[in-house]
Amino acid sequence: MEKKGKLELTWVGKYEEQDLEPRILIEDTSKSYGDVESENMLIHGDNLLALKALENDFYGSIKCIYIDPPYNTGAAFEYYDDNLAHSIWLSIMRTRLQLLRNLLSEDGTIWIQIDDEEQAYLKVLCDEVFGRDNFVNMVSVNMKNIAGASGGGEDKRLKKNCEYILIYARDYSMLPLFNGPYTYTEMSELVQQYLDEGKSWKYTSVLLDAGEKEYIGSTVDGDGNEIKVYRRKNYKSASVNQLAKKEGLTVKETYKKYGVNVYRTTNAQTSIRTRIIEFRKEHDISDELLSIEYVPRTGKNRGKLYEQFYKDDGCNLFVWLRDTSEIIDGELYKKDLQGTYWDMNAWMKNLTKEGNVVFPNGKKPEALLKQIIEMCTSEGDWVLDSFLGSGTTAATAHKLNRKWIGIEMGEQAYSHCKVRLDNVINGEQGGISKEINWQGGGGYRFYELADTLLVRHAKLPIYQINPAYTWEMTCEAICKIEGFNYDPNGEFQGYSSENRFIHITEEFVNGKYVMGLLKSLGDRQSVLIYCKKYQADMILPANVEIKRIPKDLLEKCSFESEDKA
């Protein structure tokens, strides 16, 4: 039997591809707010066309994308038509996910929040768009308690209290470790909890003095990278209980004082430890304590010079409490990496007050977005949300000093997103503001999607440049349609590489015109000329291409507002 084909999700209309006109974005300076130099963008318009408009300038630039698309639950929301046929919903999501993937940086991630109606279908769809190998996790998020009156009446189905977040990487091999999220437990409470439950608490030793460091020699890891080995002379160590008794401290006070130097030992089965055991035997080393220095190629310390300690002939590895704890307000807390269940129920109780805008059936807490954004970005990275809704993603990213792009097609771009972001810039104290000591500041630029470039002539059966377009808008639109960066400079309106330029003119182009333009080109450089009319019998150099306005534009894109048939 012939075995062909691939695993995929199919539906009616999946392969009905549509050529999109890459629209330009027009800033409405009357709606832009705050710092006029800000790079942040609030875009009003269809998110499919807006994403296409961003594709050339932001390809591979966005570190974190979060979207909370309509869940296709069959309910009619006030601000969204969430009652789409299943096939239509899948087609809508597929085209947008393909564009979003193009915008992700090579080490970026996309986070898609969904409920159980479409989660399984969306997972298979995302496997196809992003690649199954780039799936990271699915997080279950408790958004509502079902206890008491909020649980509703009895039904054949279990009451919903969880939503789901699918996480995909652009390239899993390039994905860095996430920065948390963590849960925190005060150290003395945790130690007492272990004692009360009869559990073994192993972080009981303190390295008071690491001793004198003396270089012995070097070995290598599995990739041949150097590992320097040192003996530690005259080191000092004691137990937490010994120190507490000696200094008249409580256990809590002892952990607070010595917490950064508290450790446990383990016989972890690692390739590095195996090499150190072999090195110790080969060189007949009898020292009780050794340390090594090397640059890990993987893990949270990859790329940085890292020090480890090994004790006795068995080379038991020191594991530091500080690597899993944190000092907060002078107290030591055990820090544990949170898993794939996130409880946001506490943050949902006052959600209607966040941002001073009301958005039923779709608003997400800033605490949730804070957790996501801090996990996968650093200050100054780009965050994008193409289903902005009430503006939560942009508001949170702004407070966390990330650059952001928010896209919203509905009236709430004005009534919700703009109002909320203006409040953020003015220093509003809702959401995460008090937690991070938000004081306001920054700004954003407000953009509208331009109308289609070409429209049918009112009297003749031909297409013409939209009369609403200025010449500058026309040049920018042609650059975007042809994939050039719009950057007027001298004779050229844009470039696609350091050797490829575009020239757009309203003048008649003939041989003399072309020869004059060639004087502005260097060796191995080429130009695409767009004009309304040109000499038909010209013999062009190999580095010159000519196209006509509007004829050749019609062949590049499907202009949605017009029927070209």
Image (cartoon, rainbow, N blue to C red):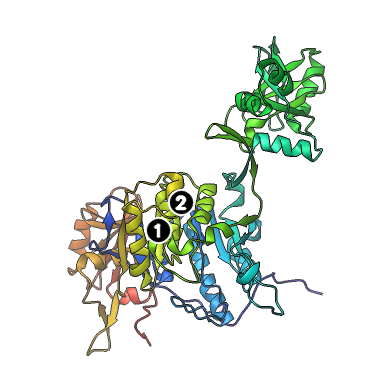
Secondary structure beneath dot 1 equals strand
Q: Is residue 488 left or right of residue 53?
A: left
Distance from label 1 to label 2 (Cα)?
A: 20 Å
Q: Mark 1 points at which residue?
A: 405
Is tag 1's residue or tag 2's residue first in the polypeptide sequence?
1
Asked if residue 14 is positioned above or below residue 213 in the image, the reply reads below
Residue 451 percent coordinates (x, y):
30, 74
Q: Is residue 17 visible?
A: yes
Asked if residue 390 is positioned above or below residue 454 in the image, the reply reads above
Q: Going 69% across and 13% down the picture, which residue do you hit? A: 235
Q: Is residue 547 left or right of residue 174?
A: left
Q: Going 78% across and 73% down the picture, which residue do you hit? A: 2
Secondary structure beneath dot 2 equals loop
Quick one: 68 or 59, which is closer to the camera? 68
Q: Is residue 550 left or right of residue 365?
A: left
Q: Could you tell me the amino acid type at mark 1?
A: Ile
Q: Going 63% across and 33% down the picture, which residue do you hit? A: 323
Q: Is residue 398 left or right of residue 361?
A: left
Quick one: 92 or 34, which is closer to the camera? 34
Q: Within 10 Å of the Cα at label 2, are there few (<14), some (14-19), or many (20+) other Cα atoms?
A: many
Q: Within 10 Å of the Cα at label 1, are there few (<14), some (14-19), or many (20+) other Cα atoms?
A: many
Q: Mark 2 points at which residue?
A: 432
